[in-house]
Amino acid sequence: MEFANLEWAEKDRVLTITIDRPAKLNALNDQTVGELAQAFAAARDRSEVAAVILTGGGEKAFIAGADIAELALNDAVKGKRCAERGQALLLLVEQLGKPVIAAINGYALGGGLEVALACTVRLASEKAVFGLPETTLGIIPGYGGTQRLPRIIGRGRALEWILTGGKYDAQEAWRVGLVNQVTKPEELLLAADSLARRMIANGPVALRYALEAVHRGAEMSLEHGLALEASLFGALASTQDTKEGLKAFLEKRKPAFSGE
């Protein structure tokens, strides 16, 4: 697929989407948000794509934030619509039904961190820098940062990050549980690809249901979350993938999952 601000590269069931606006530190303008929505919708619908890696073009930034020049034009109505559009994109990423790995190669600030928060897991280069600096501009995070960051690193730390607008390095992001791995810059995409392939070696239906159980269950009481888990566990029992996975284990061979 062709985009003005993205690069799309598929290899052996893993799709890499690269935000390619290095001169603007890959900032999210309206066009880029729209292209990301189009790209992730296509990834969701393509059976050839089993996992997605999202990264930034150039060496400095994953996504340095929203396009400030566009934000400055917002009034109350436009601002709400802007936030809702970004939130819709990130719900699409979060609910893709396939693993989405953020390979954070540099600045992940504001909207950039919010995009990373919606991904399944986050890997960071040693050079990555994280933060939600919106309050320093007199605004608040609008793409879900006030909701997802506390769920990932805890309310107290999230409030510190949000209310100070501070910046944090990759080691601090790893310490608080925001990122899963920290790598050398030149090893970041290799690590992301390796992790993606470890995931997609497993049953695709099981991956989809596991993602659903975690994401939906996080918004439920434990009782209702357990009921959801049991329902999904039961539904899997009738799939060909479950039958194949269990049979392969008993026969001491690798399973050949079909996604059915």
Image (cartoon, rainbow, N blue to C red):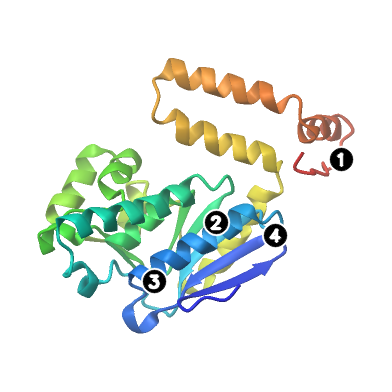
From the viewer's perspective, tell me whether residue 59 is left or right of residue 238. left
- The label number, if any, that marks residue 31 in the structure image: 3
Is there a contact, CB below 8 Å, between mark 2 and mark 3?
A: no
108 shown above or below 161: below
Crowdedness near tag 1: few (<14), some (14–19) or many (≥20) residues, C-alpha within 10 Å = few
Which SS class for mark 1? loop
| Amino acid found under the numbered disc labelled 2 | Ala
Q: Earlier in the sequence, mark 1 or mark 4?
A: 4
Crowd rating for badge 3 (residues with CA inside 10 Å; few <14, some 14–19, many 20+): few
Q: Amino acid at mark 4?
A: Arg
Q: To which residue does mark 2 refer?
A: 41
> Looking at the picture, does residue 220 appear above or below residue 202?
above
Depth order, front residue of 212/149 = 212
Q: CA distance from mark 1 to mark 4?
A: 22 Å
The earlier-in-sequence mark between 4 and 2 is 4
Image quadrant holding the C terminus, namely: top right
Among numbered discs 3 and 4, the one appearing first in the sequence: 4
| Residue at point 64%, 24% (across, down) | 233
**Callout 4 touching callout 2 (CB < 8 Å):** no
Residue depth check, mark 1 versus mark 4: number of the one nearer the observer: 4
Image quadrant assignment for residue 105: bottom left
Label annotation for residue 13: 4
Q: Secondary structure at mark 2?
A: helix
Residue at left offset 37%, top offset 49%:
178
Q: Earlier in the sequence, mark 1 or mark 2?
A: 2
Distance from disc 1 to disc 2, alpha carbons, whole Å, reads 35 Å
- The residue to which callout 1 is attached is 253
In this view of the protein, can residue 169 be seen by the observer? no
Local secondary structure at mark 4: loop
